[in-house]
Image (spheres, rainbow, N blue to C red):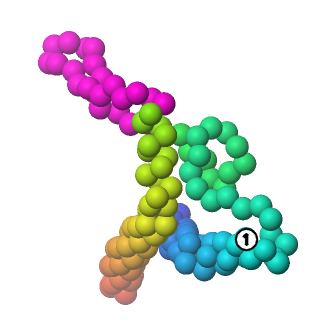
């Protein structure tokens, strides 16, 4: 096992914990403070938005569905949604299920980290056996 593999496992595990702690502990506390009229926290927004703005995380995402036929190098889009309407409702969906989405992502990360850890331990055990046989 390489140190890069260890770092990858560790990063997945730690990011999973950070996401879970944010959505289970920190964000509810922030929302509680924001809802309290006696608290000095007077600005808060969490959710997905379109465009460039102050953000915690930014990525460009696209949806692709295209097809091509044997013998023809061209491909054609299968799906032509109205971009404005689709963006509006996709963002509404993301915001409706934000916590579920991030919790599922965190769970997937943790499961992958556990599997990678088990594989790495098997690899190390195999290397140990070979070293002991020398």
**Would residue 110 be counted in the magenta stretch?**
no
- What residue did someone put label 1 on? 34
What residue is drawn where x is 44% and y is 61%? 97
Judge by depth and name the residue closer to the eye, 24 or 39. 39
Residue at position x 80%, y 65% in the image: 42
38, 72: nearer the viewer: 38
Residue 5 in view in this figure? no
Q: Is residue 102 above or below residue 14?
A: above
Instruction: Tell me: 106 left or right of 66.
Output: right
Question: In the rendered view of the protein, which quadrant contains the N terminus?
Answer: bottom left
18 and 115: which is toward the camera: 18
Q: Which residue is outermost to the bottom? A: 132
Where does the C terminus fall, quadrant-wise?
bottom left
| Residue 105 image position (x, y, % from top left) | 44, 64
Residue projecting furthest to the right: 40
Residue 36 percent location from the top left of the image: 74, 76
Q: Is residue 129 above or below residue 15?
A: below
Residue 10 relative to residue 41: left or right: left
**Overall secondary structure of the magenta stretch?**
loop
> Which class describes the residues within 10 Å of circle 1: few (<14), some (14-19), or many (20+)?
some
Tell me which segment is drawn in magenta. Answer: 61-84
Give the percent coordinates (x, y) of residue 102. Answer: 48, 64
Q: Does residue 37 appear to the left or right of 7 in the view shown?
A: right
Q: Residue 110 location in percent, x, y?
A: 43, 73
Instruction: Give the residue displayed 77% in from the left and 61% down from the top.
Output: 43
């Amino acid at each position: 096992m390489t140190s890069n593999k260890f770092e990858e496992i560790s990063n997945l595990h730690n990011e999973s914990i950070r996401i879970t702690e944010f959505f289970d502990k920190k964000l509810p506390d922030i929302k509680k403070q924001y809802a309290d009229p006696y608290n000095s926290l007077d600005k808060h927004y969490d959710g997905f938005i379109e465009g460039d703005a102050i953000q915690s995380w930014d990525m460009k995402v696209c949806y692709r569905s295209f097809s091509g036929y044997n013998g023809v190098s061209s491909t054609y889009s299968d799906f032509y949604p109205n971009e404005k309407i689709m963006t509006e409702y996709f963002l509404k969906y993301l915001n409706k299920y934000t916590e579920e989405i991030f919790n599922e992502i965190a769970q997937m990360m943790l499961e992958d980290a556990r599997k990678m850890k088990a594989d790495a331990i098997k690899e190390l055990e195999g290397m140990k056996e070979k070293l002991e046989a020398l």
